[in-house]
Structure formats: C-alpha cells, structure tokens
Image (tube, helix red, strand yellow):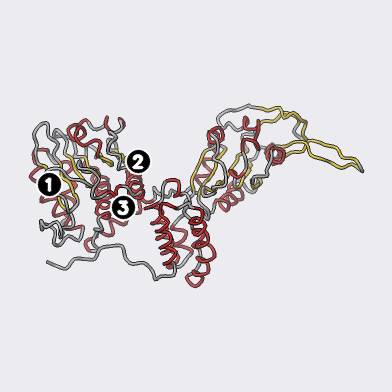
Amino acid sequence: MPDPIDPLIALCHAPRSAWADQVRPVFTEALRARYPLRDWGIEDRKTRPIQLRVNPNLDEKNAPYAGVIGPDQETSKGYGGMSFVVFPADQDGQPAMFGLVVGTNGLAPDEAILGRPGHARRVRAIARWLNGTAPPGAWAWAKHDPVRIDLPLPNEASSRMDPWRNARDKYGSVCYALVRPPNDTPTRRDWVRQAFLALLDLAMEERRLLPKKGGGGLDEAEVLRGAWQAQLFPDATDTQVVETLRSRRYVIVEGPPGTGKTEQARRILDQGYGGRGTLVQFHPAVTYERFVGGLAPRTLGQSVTFEPRRGALLDAIHAARDGKPHLLVIDEINRADLAKVLGEAIYLLEPGVKGRSLDLGWTFPDLGHEVSMPENLHILGTMNSADRSIAILDVAIRRRFAFLKLWPQREVVRRHAGPRMLDAFDRLVEIFVQYASDEALGLLPGHAYFLASDADASARLSTGLRALLEEYLAQGYTAGFADELRAYLDTLDAPLSGDRSAPDEPAE
C-alpha cells in the first residue's frame, strides 16, 4: 500500500510552478492518513479539528505557503496562533522550507501553548537533534521564546534564507522553528521525512491530535519522539566522563538529586583509574588548610607546635608522582566556598597550560615549598543542581572545568523498577518538561527515587519522592507549576495512566 506521507515529503522538492496545484490534495491525504481526522473538511469551526490554509499566489514578490492552523480561524486573510507551515523557495531548484510559525494576527488563541516552557523546550530539542544528524546543506533553527514575535530572525538564520527571501521578509519575526532541507532532497528523503514529521507531530499533539495506531504512524512517531527527547536529558556516560577527564583534566558532573552522580564518580575512580585516587566531600566548613594544606598543631609532650600538613590536593599531587593516572573526586564541590578553599592554588588548575608551579610559603613533607599539577592527576567534581543553599560558581572556576550534565534516565527505571514506578516517573518528567522554567528543570528528581518493585512502590514514593516534592512546594521552588505537582501527588496511588496514542478510525 502506498505511503501517503511520501508524496508530501517529495513535495518539498517539487518545482515551484507545480507546487500550488499539488499541495492541498497531497497535504490533505497525508494528514487524514496519519491523524484521526475522519470528519475533517467540514467548514464548521465547531467541528473541524484543524484547518489547512493554502496561499497559492506564485507572483514574484509574494510568499506562498501551506499551513496547518487552528480550527477557529477564518478561511482567508490573516490568522493567529500556532501553525505548521511549508514555504516553497522563490525559484525552482531549491527545496521548500518548513517549520513552526505564529500567525501574523498574534498569539491568540494559542497563548497557553506558545507560552508554555515545555513547547519551546521541545522545539529546541528537535532542532538540536536535527542539526546533530543533518546532511550537508541542511540545518534547523529554533527561537528560544516563541512568544517574542517582536524579535527579528537572528542573522545566523536570516543569512541562510536567501532562497526564501519573500517568506523571510514577510514572516521572519513570527517564525520560531525552521528546517532547510538539503538541495538533494530525493537522496536525503529519510532525514527530511523525520524533520517534517517531528515538527508536524508536535504541532498536532498540541491540538490533542495524536498519530493513529494503524498504518505504522504511531510506531514511527514514537521512534521520532524518542530520538529528539534524548536531547532533553542527555546522558553523561562513564565513558564520556573519562574521555573528557583525559582531554580536559578537570571536570564537573552536575545534575538533580537522585541521578547517581556520586555512584558514577566512585565507579570511574574504581574502574577507570584502578582505584588510584581518593574521594573527598565538600561542605561549608571546608577550608584552604584542609583541602590544599597549611599549618596544623602538633603536640610534643606538654608543648604544642605548628608544622605544615598536606591537605587532600597536596596528598593527591604527591600520590600522582608515581606517573600513573590518578583521580581526585570532590563530591558536592559547590557546597564549599571554592574561591576561599582553592586560594592561589586555582592558578594550577589550567588544563591547557603546562609547567605552572606555585610557591606554597611552607615546606611540606615529601613535596617541598614549590608544587605543580602532574598531568596524570585529574579532578572530578559532582554538583547538585537542585541545592539552592549554595552560591553559584564564579567565572574563574567555570572556565577551568569542563561541565557535563547527568539527568534522570528512563531506561534505568525501566530496567530496575515495576510498571507502576515507570508510570510515576513518566508522568513527573512530563510535568517538569512541560511547565518548569529552565532553572526549575534542574529540580527534576532523579531515577533513584523510582527504583523499587511495584510491591514496594507506595513506601518508596511516600518516604522519598513525596517528601522531596512537598519540600519543593513549601520552599516555593516550583511556584510556577505548583498546582500540577499537587495534582500529581494526589494521584500517586492512582492506577497506571492510559495510552497516549489515538485510536484507529472506523472504516469509511
């Protein structure tokens, strides 16, 4: 059976002269095949789920388009709200561009969609995913905030849109996601199809129109969704951390509580460095003398003297003199005042510079008074992104460390927990993705809160996750979506959530 999506993707490379005649029937058939639109086509705004708007005017200075827009818009002239739009190039020989656009009449009636953090976050994730897999000549772009229709296209995007100059000049400020297919679209059709359907599926989902189960649409949509969702929560694997340590020497892994940052650091110390190193934990009482070194009291009989004593850093430098790779792990590195704890030793933490040495002012046992950082000594810090009691790391520290993020991982929950815990994890992630600000997203509880069998789920959720979320609510950390979290807490003991997909339509 022919795939009705293929002609729609082929349309991206159709000659401009043929585009206007083909776009409406091809688009209509593809939409009806993929989504539950059995009664679509009725012009009554109360019953139609979407509207296909086509401007077929191919005059030289016009900007023709085909757009999937909201159901309650007029059938001509301007429209408002969120739309998925295809723009043919101004001349033959260039592919059509497509993306997400705010109608020129403004945000209404889709202010709630366009202003939700999760909508913009998902669009940016799709763009990152597409750029990571793009063939030569293709690119994707997403605006950080779709509601800022007062802002022009950034030059990085505008400069790439000369073949679509008319559309750019007329609609550039209201575009918030754009994909430029490669010129050889017929040979890169898989990438174009993925890009087209990822954005179209997202726009339709926002209108509560999910792909149908029949015909493979749901399966394809879930594969695409999984691919770009990985951009929301990239996994800093042990291998990636070790490779970054070898190239940058100083690394900080940051992430929400319960993501296994400390366990990962211990694994890397044991497996990646053969146990050669040590782990220290920072807290507000850690001092320069304790971490780097300084004078410490020593009792001799009834008298007390002071002598230089190495701290954790100088101990690590001494141990690394054997020439083998060593690792110093600093757990909760941001809980101490790093500027004071490191002092002048920060001068040594310059991964790209060799031969730096520091006069310590005291002669330390087995080290002397001058010290440098051995190239085989690496430092790995862990940082809890949800800890609001600590100060932000200053620029001097951030410049010297490479930062990797460790996010909650669904696969860990799927492998080690029951269906109920996986359902609880999925629902909470959805709330944070959809409603949390960029800052609050770092509060998302990690997978460790969900690692229990269904038999132990109630106890685990009540003593761990519920207490954490209630603390967030009490402290006002999640004020922007407090009601969503409260509703989630109220339904923690509810049955599993239902299927997200749309049902098959009855035969016509």
Residue 264 visible in the displayed image: yes
408 versus 364 height, above or below? below
Which mark, by number, is residue 23?
A: 1
Kind of residue at badge 1 = Val
Q: Position of residue 375 (x, y in %)?
A: 61, 34
Near mark 2 (Cα within 10 A), the count class, few <14, some 14-19 or many ≥20, is some
Quadrant (top left/top right/bottom left/bottom right) for the N terminus: bottom left
Residue 224 circle label: 3
Furthest residue toward bottom: 455
Q: Residue at x 12, y 45 (%)?
A: 54
Q: Which mark is residue 326?
A: none
Mark found first going from the N terminus, 3 or 2:
2
Q: Is residue 327 visible?
A: no
In front: label 1 or label 2: 2
Q: For this view, does 225 lie left or right of residue 36?
A: right
Labels 1 & 3 near each other (Cβ < 8 A): no
Sequence order check: which comes first, mark 1 or mark 3? Answer: 1
Q: Residue at x 11, y 45 (%)?
A: 76
Under circle 3, the secondary element is: helix
Residue at (24% x, 58% y) in the render: 209
The disc label shown at residue 144, or none: 2
Three-letter amino acid code at disc 2? His
Q: Residues within 10 Å of mark 3 (few under 14, many from 20)?
A: some
